Image (cartoon, rainbow, N blue to C red):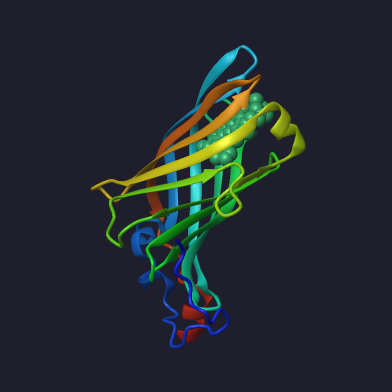
Amino acid sequence: MNDFPDDIFTEPEDVDPDTLANLGPLRRLAGIWEGTKGVDLNPKAEGPERREFTERIELQPIDPQANGPQLFYGLRYHTRILATDEDATFHDQVGYWLWEPATGLMMQTLAIPRGQIAMASGHAAPDAASLVLTATRGSTEYGICSTAFLEHAFRTDSYRIEVNFNPDGSWSYVLDTMLLVHGKPFQHRDVNTLVKVAEPTPNPLMLLGKR
Ligand code: HEM
């Protein structure tokens, strides 16, 4: 059951402009990261294909966002993945990671250029060492939307991401994207560990305040 206020228009007052100080468990994702130990299992006609990849992901704070009384802090991200044996981009993805301090709600939006978008959600404590978010095809709230071709040939039934923060400051993820290919389930899995190569840039409102 959702416990939303009757007043859906009034926005919160005195919002702290410092996104990096209000990201809860997402704070440890902020920055620019690289990973060289990626492994992908993807569907091919002859069966699962295993490929190794490198990744660069930029996660930068955005200004606080309000939906009426609902307040989010977040990061905008872009990840670019190259297979270790090929120059062309292997996987590209953009979106937001969002955190609602009042409820512990986390969201990840993702758009990938095969004509597919999703929004995954989960809950966590501000000091969580592990995050789990899921999206399910058919859900109007935290769902998956694909091209007609993908619906026909590679139906994407669910998406799950698990992030684990490591003691050395790096973080690792496991992505499980469940596909239906020729009527058979296929577990499209990706794993990697990301090491920080640069600190994040404060959000635009914070930068304005510093002039
Ligand atoms: C690290 C992340 C990922 C990598 C490296 C990756 C890589 C790949 C590769 C190499 C293929 C096979 C492409 C081909 O044969 O043309 C593939 C297929 C696919 N991926 Fe991913 N993927 C990732 C994440 C995702 C996510 C998050 C989703 C959706 C939520 C997704 C959805 C699909 C679908 C639907 C296909 C089948 C379409 C096709 O093979 O043409 N992938 N992926």
* Residue 112 in view, yes or no: no
- Near-viewer residue (107 or 191): 107
Q: Is residue 118 left or right of residue 29?
A: right
* Residue 123 in view, yes or no: yes
Q: Could you tell me residue 208's position as x and y percent? A: 51, 83
As drawn, which residue projects farthest toward the front?
Answer: 1
Q: Could you tell me residue 33's position as x and y percent? A: 43, 49
- Near-viewer residue (6 or 171): 6
The answer to whether 25 is drawn above or below residue 193 in the figure is: below
As drawn, which residue projects farthest toward the top?
Answer: 46
User: In the image, what residue occupies the spot 44% across and 45% down?
Assistant: 34
The answer to whether 52 is drawn above or below residue 159 in the figure is: above
Count all numbered tags in the image, as a single digit. 0
Q: Is residue 187 left or right of residue 168?
A: right
User: Regarding ligand 1, which quadrant of the image does it lie in?
Assistant: top right
Q: Could you tell me residue 191's position as x and y percent? A: 43, 34
User: In the image, what residue occupies the spot 58% across and 82% down?
Assistant: 9
User: In the image, what residue occupies the spot 45% across and 80% down?
Assistant: 17
Quarter of the image with the N terminus in it: bottom left
User: In the image, what residue occupies the spot 37% across and 62% down?
Assistant: 27
As drawn, which residue projects farthest toward the left?
Answer: 167
Q: Could you tell me residue 142's position as x and y percent? A: 55, 51
- Near-viewer residue (130 or 143): 143
- Near-viewer residue (49 or 88): 49
The answer to whether 95 is drawn above or below residue 211 in the figure is: above
Question: Residue 126 occupies which quadrant of the picture?
Answer: bottom left
